[in-house]
Image: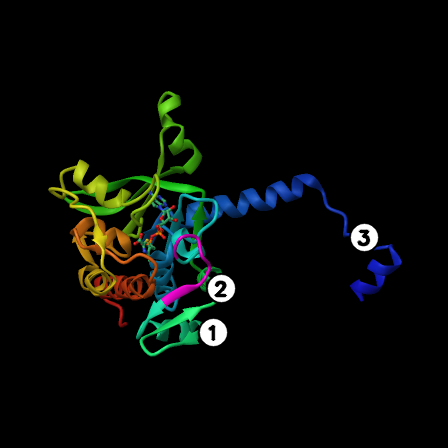
Amino acid sequence: MVHNVLVQGDFKFAPVKESDVSREMTTRYMQDLIDHADADVVIVGAGPSGLSCAYELSKHKNIKVAIIEASVAPGGGGWVGGQLFSPMVVRKPAHEFLDELGIAYDEKENYVVVSHAALFTSTLISKVIANGVKLFNATSVEDFIIRDGVVSGVVTNWALVTKAHGTQSCMDPQVMESKIVVSSCGHDGPFGATGVRRLVEVGLLDKMPGMRALDMNASEDAIVALTREIVPGMIITGMEVAEASGTARMGPTFGAMMVSGRKAADLVLAKLNKSV
Ligand code: AHZ
């Protein structure tokens, strides 16, 4: 029907009052902030590991989960494979996650290949949001709430404000309390491993060894094995684990991000005393 009016040239949108548009966005966004001032879980970073964790947690409708992403676009390093090429290689048995998400792939003996990394990432983002996880994008975590050595929430600001701290006088942040923080900040770019870095600065960790050179076989198993509660109240996942543990990077294979994220979710559920 729409096609007919388009062809006839008399298509018209329903009228709108500009201030209603503003009110709709503002009230909803502010209500989301109010609702998540106390969350059960805050996930920092919406790359492949943070999103995989969020997806698992989103199966539990009684758990309030916020995912905070500094970039306007969620997805982190999940939009491309290696060297900005589009295909995404996933070593078995992590392909079972792709089966669950309904993502098609080419099958080889020990691994599978998704035709475009964006297919994986866009599918995961849409399921996470549709399942009720609240994504706060363009928002950065600048610090943590730490009480008696326990990470008890995050300190947030608009990411653009965070980037401008060096050019302005103090622009204070605000906060979100949570029972558990999952740090999935990756290793790359201006925000790489910011969670673990901050733990070192405040003296909760001695040092951040930094990731080692590429070794796909060693790296993926180690990242999953070392996905853990690194200090009370904070679980690390994804490439931030390699930074925190001094293990190898894996480069362009993504299975460990998925499995590590799902393990992080299981650790969260155990802490919240929920069944996996
Ligand atoms: O913007 C960051 C990115 O989207 C976001 N982030 C980091 N610090 C943040 C902060 N506040 C808010 N303080 C923050 N957001 O976290 C996301 C991290 O995504 P990523 O894709 O970089 O990390 P990942 O561990 O989920 O996946 C890594 C993918 C890689 S890197 C790699 C290699 O270089 O060897 N191999 C793989 C598979």
What label does residue 104 carry, if any? Answer: 1
Q: Are marks 3 and 2 in contact (CB under 8 Å)?
A: no
3 or 2: tag closer to the N-terminus: 3
**Placement of 17 over or under 271, stated as above or below:** above
What colouring does the structure picture have? rainbow
Nearer to us: label 3 or label 2: 2
Q: For the N terminus, which image quadrant?
A: bottom right
Whether residue 212 sits left or right of residue 261 in the image: it is left
Q: Are marks 1 and 2 in contact (CB under 8 Å)?
A: yes
Identify the residue at horizontal 47%, vertical 45% (top origin). 72
1 or 2: tag closer to the N-terminus: 1
Identify the residue at horizontal 35%, vertical 66% (top origin). 56
- Farthest residue, direction right: 8
**Placement of 63 over or under 23, stated as above or below:** below
Query: Between marks 3 and 2, how big is the CA–CA gap?
Result: 34 Å
1 or 3: tag closer to the N-terminus: 3
Amino acid at the residue labelled 2: Leu
Nearer to us: label 1 or label 3: 1
What label does residue 47 carry, if any? Answer: none
Q: Which residues are magenta?
A: 82-89
